[in-house]
Image (cartoon, rainbow, N blue to C red):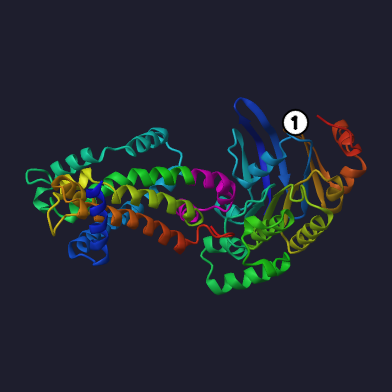
Amino acid sequence: MSVALHGVVVRRRGKTILGPVDLDLGGDGLSIVLGPNGAGKTTLLKVLHGVARISAGEVVWSVPEEEARGAQAYVFQSPIMLRRSVRQNLAYPLELLGTDKAETAQRVADWAGRIGLSDALERPAPRLSGGERQKLALGRALIRAPRVLFLDEPCANLDGRSTREIEALLEIARAAGTRIVMTTHDLGQARRLASDVVFLHRGAVREQAAAETFFDGPQTAEARAFLKGDIVE
Amino acid sequence: MNEIWAGVVAAFGLIVSLDGDLVEITLRSLQVSLSALFIASALALPFGTWLAIRRFRFRRATIATLNALMGLPPVVVGLIVYLLLSRSGPFGVLGLLFTPTAMIIAQVIIITPLIASITHQAMRELWAEYHDLLISLNTTNRQRIATLLWDGRRTLLTAALAGFGRAIGEVGAIMIVGGNIDHATRVLTTAIALETGKGDFALALGLGFVLIALALLVNFAIHALSRTEREGRW
């Protein structure tokens, strides 16, 4: 399931936040969206996910729109916890689809194990720690077995261990064929995970390349400066 | 001062001996106000939530109207319901005037805007929190409303309690449409007004204590049922 953006522009209050963007994301791999703050990374992800209003252009999925929307999941930068138990949070996306109870219970148990929260199923989700919440949000996103997964800074404010656990979950999902598109500020994480990179600057795609190509020899001055650790504005 | 004291003593006597009139009036009061609360909640909770999640052209005007209707004077509601239900009114054929049903109708009109308005305010906050997730999960409007109602049930209880408080203590509207008829439409508040007028302070005070006790009891009961003040619950 691949997606293409044609001349997409997002304007808010007269200011252009993103675009014009032409972008082709193939059917597999893990794309990392890089760029300084305000480059439009989150907006790009939301446009792809279909939850941001676009001012011009179009987003074209390789499958019909309805099917495309149903096959995606999104993990927000600050995870949104339903005011319910961990179990009910995990079950929620399946309940929306009307999945039968036995199957829901089985998949919830399965995913609780994978995200290491089997012992916390009855705890209220808003009381989990930051790392646990992010893992729960990831589990809740993956429980529908989406074909495309968007993540917005999934490891922001997390310590090394939580980051490693989340990266491991992402690697498994990717191996199972889930297309992943994520933003990050952590260049080390980008190098560890990326199969290809999209570099955004001031709302425009400045570079799109395979990971090795990008990290070994960035084409634009901004990307070179960004990778070197300079402050790019 | 003596008179008041004598009234208090007599009032306790009535309550302890479960005076027939007192019990009957109390039960009718509960029947009318709880029915009104039930109907008003069924209307106002989904409507208030719907208002919180939908953007439409006259949304702000609707909310402003709703807030204004919270202060609807009960006597005016009583008058309008009276006119609608009286023999010559459009619903006169139903013969509802001076029945408990008419009182329920009037109270529903009084408390629905109140419950809807409190619901809307509470749900607006919850919706701001859930918005991105529920949009992302491709939920239908119905699913969104159901999710918000369920996860916001704590605050909704407060809305319902406010509605009940207004209904059980209300006298203007039910006096007009009910008529305060003995053994038919007499409730706590109308009875208190009548007994005070007659100078029978014992019964009036007794009814007053029951009214206050009822309000407290219902609050405690609902809090206990929903475990609202317990840690780690919603």
Left or right? Give the position of B129 relative to A179.
left
Which residue is rendered at x = 62% and y = 30% of the image? Answer: A11
Which residue is rendered at x = 65% and y = 57% of the image? Answer: A127
Does any portion of residue B200 appear in the rendered image?
yes
Residue interval drawn in magenta: B123-149
- Assign the C terminus of chain A to one quadrant of the image: top right
Which residue is rendered at x = 89% and y = 37% of the image? Answer: A229
Of residues A221 and B230, which is closer to you in this image?
Answer: B230
Of residues A56 and A32, which is closer to you in this image?
Answer: A32
Q: From the top left corner, tell me how far across and down residue B104 is, in percent.
A: 23, 52
- Assign the N terminus of chain A to one quadrant of the image: bottom right
Q: Mark 1 — residue?
A: A202
Q: Farthest residue in the left direction?
A: B88
Q: Is residue B141 magenta?
A: yes
Q: How many marks?
A: 1
Q: From the top left corner, tell me how far across and down residue A39 is, in percent.
A: 74, 34
- In the structure shown, which secondary structural element does the residue marked by tag 1 occupy? loop
* Amino acid type indicated by mark 1: Arg
Left or right? Give the position of A37 relative to A100.
right
Left or right? Give the position of A18 relative to B209.
right
> Can you tell which quarter of the image residue A6 is in?
top right
Of residues B28 and B206, which is closer to you in this image?
Answer: B206
Q: From the top left corner, tell me how far across and down residue A48 is, in percent.
A: 65, 45
> Can you tell which quarter of the image residue A121 is in?
bottom right
Left or right? Give the position of B27 relative to B94.
right
Which secondary structure is most common in the magenta stretch?
helix
Chain letter of mark 1 equals A
Where is A107 relative to A127, above or below? below
Crowding around mark 1 (Cα neighbors within 10 Å: few <14, some 14 to 19, many 20+) is some
